[in-house]
């Protein structure tokens, strides 16, 4: 990694622009996935549902063994085997609605390599700016971390305990839910739907629940609690993998009149994701 650091950091400042249209069908299917009743009048894109658009479109011949597009292209070719969506920060300025022509400009803001207790880590920070008919609709910072596979006999990490929430939702993450979310977001990463691959190759105990799916569940819980309000900011950080082997709780508590703290509480009582949401 040391020899490649300068080459990886050369990706800083690289950008790409994609165009899309806010279609109704992905929103309808996402409502079904979230177990929400149909609503043909819903025209506005809820917070984080913009992830249903600007989907990756790598050709089948460009897909790697893990189901992701091969390294390189827009993102730097980090030579570490494991990749995860570690967190993000979003600010919302204007709504996106069905029928809108939208544009996303993405820029590599930073590439950083560190050594942690689990080995070498590479952090890539991407800035996304999504615009619609009203101008800038949202700005998002997307944090990606690449890391080594853990060494045999490595110590099991310790995680912080999660309290019970003031308001909660229990989710049963079966393989059908994870497959449907992968399909809806055109995410080919095999850790989310291929049990043989994730257990025998990656060494995990079960299918991994998507970080963006958990973040979307957290934002949805907050939106229901603050019904009628407009989202201003949302941030989240992944702390521990969640698998399809047990139910988990989507939890929240009020933080004053205009915000709430949010978290995922897994079956062991650990905090697997932490988030914060503010409203206007």
Image (spheres, rainbow, N blue to C red):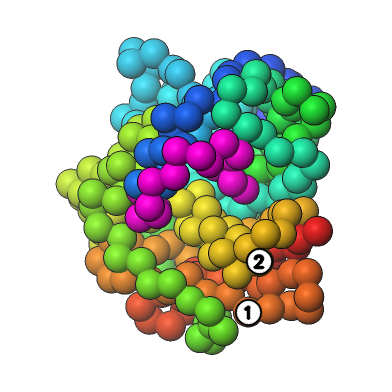
Q: Is residue 200 placed above or below 27 in the rendered structure?
A: below
Residue shown at 75%/45% (left/top)? 92
The magenta segment: 33-51
Q: Is residue 54 placed above or below 185 in the rendered structure?
A: above
> Magenta segment, principal secondary structure?
loop
Say which of marks 1 and 2 sits in front.
2
Q: Nearer the viewer, residue 8 or 125?
A: 125
User: Is residue 31 rendered to the left or right of residue 4?
Assistant: left
Gap in angstroms between the C-alphas marked 1 and 2: 11 Å
Q: Which residue is mark 2?
A: 226
SS assignment at label 2: loop
Q: Residues within 10 Å of mark 2 (few under 14, many from 20)?
A: some
* Among the two numbered marks 1 and 2 on one chain, the one whose residue lies closer to the N terminus: 2
Disc count in the image?
2
Residue shown at 18%/46% (left/top)? 196
Residue shown at 52%/75% (left/top)? 251
Residue shown at 38%/46% (left/top)? 38
On the image, the x and y values in percent for residue 245 come to: 25, 66
On the image, the x and y values in percent for residue 214 come to: 48, 58
Q: Splitting the image into 4 quarters, where does residue 64 fall?
A: top left
Q: Nearer the viewer, residue 235 or 169?
A: 169
Q: Is residue 276 placed above or below 215 in the rendered structure?
A: below
Q: Which mark is residue 19?
A: none
Q: Splitting the image into 4 quarters, where does residue 230 fall?
A: bottom right
On the image, the x and y values in percent for residue 267 come to: 35, 78
- Would residue 272 be visible to someone looking at this image? yes
Q: Which residue is mark 1?
A: 253
User: Is residue 55 rendered to the left or right of residue 266?
Assistant: right
User: Is residue 203 rendered to the left or right of residue 7?
Assistant: left
Q: Residues within 10 Å of mark 1 (few under 14, many from 20)?
A: some
Q: Nearer the viewer, residue 139 or 124?
A: 139
């Amino acid at each position: 990694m040391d020899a490649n650091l300068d080459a990886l950091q050369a990706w800083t400042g690289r950008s790409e622009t994609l165009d899309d249209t806010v279609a109704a069908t992905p929103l309808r299917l996402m409502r079904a996935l979230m177990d929400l009743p149909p609503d043909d009048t819903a025209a506005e894109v809820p917070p984080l549902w913009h992830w249903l658009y600007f989907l990756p479109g790598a050709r089948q011949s460009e897909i790697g063994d893990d189901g992701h597009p091969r390294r390189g292209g827009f993102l730097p070719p980090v030579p570490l085997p494991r990749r995860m969506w570690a967190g993000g920060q979003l600010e919302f300025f204007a709504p996106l609605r069905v029928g809108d022509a939208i544009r996303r400009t993405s820029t590599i803001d930073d590439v950083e390599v560190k050594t942690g207790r689990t080995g070498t880590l590479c952090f890539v920070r991407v800035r996304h700016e999504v615009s619609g008919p009203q101008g800038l609709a949202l700005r998002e910072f997307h944090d990606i971390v690449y890391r080594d596979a853990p060494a045999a006999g490595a110590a099991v990490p310790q995680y912080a305990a999660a309290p019970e929430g003031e308001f909660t939702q229990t989710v049963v993450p079966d393989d059908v839910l994870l497959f449907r979310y992968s399909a809806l977001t055109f995410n080919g990463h095999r850790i989310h739907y291929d049990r043989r691959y994730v257990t025998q190759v990656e060494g995990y105990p079960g299918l991994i629940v998507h970080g963006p799916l958990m973040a979307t569940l957290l934002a949805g819980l907050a939106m229901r609690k603050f019904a009628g309000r407009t989202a201003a900011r949302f941030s989240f950080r992944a702390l521990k993998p969640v698998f399809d082997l047990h139910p988990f709780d989507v939890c929240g508590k009020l933080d004053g009149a205009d915000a709430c703290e949010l978290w995922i509480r897994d079956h062991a009582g650990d905090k697997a994701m932490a988030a914060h949401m503010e409203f206007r």
